[in-house]
Amino acid sequence: MSAEETGHVTGTKDKDYNILWFTEACLSNVLRLETYAQDAEREGDRELADFFRRAQGESRKGAEQAKELLKKRLSS
């Protein structure tokens, strides 16, 4: 891990890049977990499908919280 700000490379401060990355990662995870839940359902494994749906909900929640934080920071 670098202790140095790398925003000069990306044009975006690390802390801002990190929240953008986190939002994208959560949203991507929501989509991936949908596939996993459908796979489990297709195999008749309701317990596993429910597990993936709960995890999907948590990822969706993380994405929503991050989007709200972004909205607040971008409007100031």
Image (spheres, rainbow, N blue to C red):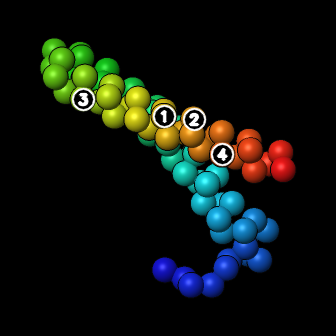
Foreground mark, 2 or 3, reads: 2
Instruction: Give residue 2's position: percent from left, percent from top.
Output: 54, 83
- The residue type indicated by label 4 comes to Leu
The amino acid marked with disc number 3 is: Phe
Q: Amino acid at mark 1?
A: Lys
Separation of disc 4 and disc 3 at Cα? Answer: 27 Å
Q: Are marks 2 and 1 in contact (CB under 8 Å)?
A: yes
- Count residues near mark 3 (Cα–Cα under 10 Å), then give few for <14, some for 14-19, many for 20+: some
Q: Quick one: SS at disc 4?
A: helix
Question: Residue 27's spot in the image, x, y percent?
Answer: 53, 38
The residue singled out by tag 1 in the image is: 61
Tell me if 35 is positioned left or right of 48 in this view.
Answer: right
Residue under label 3: 51
Residue 75 sits in quarter: top right
Q: Residues within 10 Å of mark 4 (few under 14, many from 20)?
A: few
Q: Which residue is mark 4?
A: 69
Please name the residue shown 51% across and 47% down the image. 25
* Residue drawn where x is 64% and y is 40% of the image: 67
Mark 3: secondary structure: helix
Q: Element under label 1?
A: helix
Spatial CA distance of label 4 from label 1 is 12 Å
Q: Earlier in the sequence, mark 4 or mark 1?
A: 1
| Spatial CA span between label 2 and label 4 | 9 Å
Query: Label 2: which residue?
Result: 64
Residue drawn at (64%, 52%) of the image: 20
Q: Is residue 40 visible?
A: yes
Residue 15 falls left or right of residue 43: right
- Name the amino acid type tagged 2: Glu
Asked if 50 appears above or below 4 in the picture, the reply is above
Mark 2 / mark 3, whichever is N-terminal: 3
Whether residue 32 is visible here, answered yes or no, is: no
Q: Position of residue 15 (x, y in %)?
A: 65, 65
